[in-house]
Amino acid sequence: MRGQRRKCPFGAPDATGRRRLPGRRELPRAAGTRDLQLRRFPVAGFDCWGRPLGVSRMFFYLSKKVAMSNNVKLKCISWNKDQGFIACGGDDGLLRVLKLETQTDDTKLRGLAAPSNLSMNQTLEGHSGSVQIVTWNEQYQKLTTSDQNGLIIVWMLYKGSWYEEMINNRNKSVVRSMSWNADGQKICIVYEDGAVIVGSVDGNRIWGKDLKGVQLCHVAWSADSKALLFGMANGEIHIYDNQGNFMVKMKMNCLVNVTGAVSIAGIHWYHGTEGYVEPDCPCLAICFDNGRCQIMRHENDQNPVLIDTGMYVVSIQWNHTGSVLAVAGSQKVITQDKDVNTVQFYTPFGEHLGTLMVPGKQMSALSWEGGGLKIALTVDSYIYFANIRPDYKWGYCSNTVVYAYTRRDRPEYCVTFWDTKNNDKYVKYVKSLISITTCGDFCILATKADENHPQFVLVLCNSIGTPLDPKYIDLVPLFVTMTKTHVIAASKEAFYIWQYRVAKKLTALEINQITRSRKEGRERIYHVDDTPSGSLDGVLDYSKAIQGTRDPICAITASDKTLIVSRESGTFQRYSLPNVGLIQKYSLNCQAYQLSLNCNSSRLAVIDILGVLTFFDLDARVTDSTGQQVVGELLKLERKDVWDMKWAKDNPDLFAVMEKTRMYVFRNLDPEEPIQTSGYICNFEDLEIKSVLLDEILKNPEYPNKDYIINFEIRSLRDSRALIEKVGIEDASQFIEDNPHPRLWRLLAEAALQKLDLHTAEQAFVRCKDYQGIKFVKRLGNLQSEPMKQAEVAAYFGRFEEAERMYLDMDRRDLAISLRLKLGDWFRVLQLLKTGSGDADDSLLEQAHNAIGDYFADRQKRLNAIQYYVQGRNQERLAECYYMLEDYVGLENLASSLPENHKLLPEIAQMFVRVGMCEQAVTAFLKCNQPKAAVDTCVHLNQWNKAVELAKSHNMKEIGSLLARYASHLLEKNKILDAIELYRKANYFYDAAKLMFKATSALAGLLEEEVLSTSSRFTDNAWRGAEAYHFFILAQRQLYEGYVDTALKTALHLRDYEDIIPAVEIYSLLALCACASRAFGTCSKAFIKLESLETLSSEQKQQYEDLALEIFTKHTPKDNRKSELDGLLEGGEGKLPTCVATGSPITEYQFWMCSVCKHCVLAQEINNYNFCPLCHSAVG
């Protein structure tokens, strides 16, 4: 079962604390229900301009119409999502299978722009009555159909045609619905008389049942195939398990206060095959003929999304990702007497996406195409195809396409940053993504902060998806726009402005400004009804965001100096930026969906919810009908069916528009000839339009293809190029003079350079303000040789091979080498130096060898690099390569080849020091006359003999301190005699004598203690580590052999060895032995000790606590029998010796003691051993 749905704060809360969508009414609640909000979208009503109400989020238009022969009326249609076959059925046994093929070799005409023709149009014979149901089994490529006589036929594909495979007829009742489960293994068939049959894909009957006293009309499987929904003719829905057992009757919240008979128009359960748009997303849609609809997260959802479509419904279906629900039917229109065929589109959360009107008398069915880009509708005897333009979550910044999609295996959105230049991609996973907005080199990801928290986040990212600065806001970012300096996010009532900054080289003043509080105005919030003056008086007051308004925001856009906020009434508010001040209000007769400002903020493009594009001049002053002068003018140009547009970045009069599957480019409101494409416009600059085929990319989003990025040149660029190539530079120059643009002047300059027309080239470079080009033309003018000029021009245009060949033909090898030097092509430089006649420049040869060596070293190919460094005599990089390759022989040979006091010797010596090679390091230090460093190296590497020898041979003054340090080092290792010998050899007899005296005194004391005590403390300490691990192993062996009491006694000894064995090991073993011996009191003490250990992490301690709780809730923490060890193992002076064979204390008078380790064994046990259990010496 899936979780309860969360509420989304779309509007301000009312007195009851509930939030409502503006303009939506709520149905009364039934007794026992929670807050159920019916989202009413009155699309049957119209606004004051005669346009339908509702906020559109996607565009659709009719694209193709297929007629049935003899005007046979169609009843049903189904589109195979995988193979693309379309099955339609109708009167007189009509059953056809069609297929639309898009055959084109032009990459620009992919997707919806490609011409679609019927590659299959097969009539299937077999039904005599009206075909009422067609359904596909995509997994097994089967088509199941049924007619009004109850005849069921299963069809199979064989050699490109469809043939009958199986047939069935009960001859009792008519089939009302059929449904395959998610994996295509089972089909459920329901008959009008209450009969239910579940069969397998191979035609075998699994089970059948007669539901008495009911009339069935619909059936649907759950995603896991564990539940079945049966829709009754009276509008009820019953839930059964997959074996046909009744579970519960579904509660229909959408029918509250509905009177009269209703019937179910459709049930569709999206099975999550392509993932979900959000975690816990509604996926079960149920709709009635009266237009009431509810969308549920699962079959027992008590808080479904409720919709009143305001239409008579005949069919519903989810798209392939479960993100759009299409509802087909008819509705009455006030301006017309007859009903109008209508398809309405909704999100899983009930948000209205738009309305499609379809001609004809009566619509009967609909079906989505597998990619969600087309929808098929049966009206009368026709199939209408409509194209869908989804509102993808995407953007374009810095040669990077950013797009989001869902995957079945992840609950988050997968956001891909695809660098189209280098074909690299970076993937980020973002939960609850709302939108993607881009500008310049950055993008904003708007997301919900947390499932249980009302905050939202605006994440500023760079072009590889690295988060730079997240901003948490208490305002729903329904609309987001950004400029190079600001991010503006708006809800229905207010808008938030954030002046963002990116990490560059900042001065101290800028750092101070960044660290100041928000009061400086970097973040501000304004209510849409406010009239800000433009002074820095904006504050971050989120109380403005929950104040209601009668005229909500519906779209925003911004440039560097202007912000436009559009409201549902058609009012446009113009604000100044960066100081937000209300400049002007305009009024248009439309509800905007998308706004866009041109590059100088003089004109505003408006796409309304119906896809109508209009233009508004913000600064024009005109006289209205009353004779008053007003600011702003609605321009005469209007385009329909527009779903995307983009202004040129460098020309305020240029823009591109996407209408259906055509792209139009306008200059001064005059269109050029259209270009056939279905791409989304990324960028319009330098008379070139970059477009991305998102539809194609999202078919396989993990592997984007560069073929899906298309560049279009506009007509003036194409014409200029054609004039230059076919007519000449003079005529082309005149044309460009009449249609000036920097890109055209650059094109002319390049053409003039090719023909060495330097005068025209210089003038053209001046017109396009290319200073480097002007300098290049000046330099060409100073050259006398014509071939030399041509070679320079070839190099300027990147034809380097051609330029090099020209230089060599002129016998100017030096210029060819100079060209390759500028390009950094050292391989070719070396080749030219070696192949040319005459002696090559030795310094240049060395430079080339070293540069090639650097090339290989940077790519970790150091063996190749060494060959070139040797020829380039680059000892520094040679040493580095030898060191990185761990070739210390080569490094030693290099050190020996260097002259004395070479500057590289100390560095090589340090390399030897770092890897512990003392002798080689000393040799290098001595070669560069640094004996002090050599001695320090010996000390550092504990080569004291060598250090003393070096100190003596070089008459170093600090030899005394060095000897003292060496002696203390030897004494730490208990090498007293070696320290005495060191002082004796160095003629420090007094220090040697002092050490000798201490050693003899200690030895005398040791001998005396040995005489007085058989168990010497010195001896004990020597064997203490062996004791610890001996008893540790012994306890485990006893435990695994089943001697649990003996193992417990042995384990108790280990408490004295915490300084040798880790405490966690000791007390874990003790707890295990005590538990096995059922001494739960001892076990409890061991757990207490374990839980108090500071060396354990909190997770490990928690695990011990959980285990202890599990043990001691079943067993009282008391020892079942009093152990005789309690008094014996307390420790202290009177502690008894322990048997190293059994681990038990020795209480008897007679026992055996080892002559080597002085440890004891019980007398009766020693007979079983030939060697001491501890030290393994022979038993005498």
Image: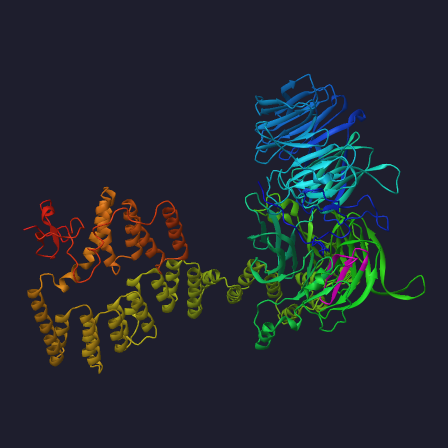
Image quarter of the N terminus:
top right
Residue at x 62% of width, y 39% of height: 300
Residue 817 image position (x, y, % from top left): 50, 65
Q: Which residues are magenta?
A: 549-571
Note whether residue 542 is visible: yes
Residue at x 28% of width, y 62% of height: 889
Q: Does 1010 sit left or right of 290 as displayed?
A: left
Residue 1018 image position (x, y, % from top left): 14, 64
Q: In this rendering, is residue 684 above or below 898?
A: above
Q: Does 1095 sit left or right of 618 as displayed?
A: left
Residue at x 18% of width, y 71% of height: 971
Furthest residue toward bottom: 957
Taking depth in this image into account, of 366 and 451 the one nearest to the observer is: 451
Q: Does 19 sit left or right of 707 as displayed?
A: right
Taking depth in this image into account, of 401 and 832 the one nearest to the observer is: 401
Taking depth in this image into account, of 213 and 111 the one nearest to the observer is: 213
The quarter of the picture where residue 117 lies is: top right
Note whether residue 485 is visible: no
Furthest residue toward top: 171
Q: In this rendering, is residue 742 above or below 326?
A: below
The quarter of the picture where residue 853 lies is: bottom left
The answer to if 555 sits in the magenta stretch is yes
Residue 884 image position (x, y, % from top left): 36, 62
Q: In this rendering, is residue 1151 above or below 265?
A: below
The answer to if 423 sits in the magenta stretch is no
Q: In this rendering, is residue 604 above or below 149?
A: below
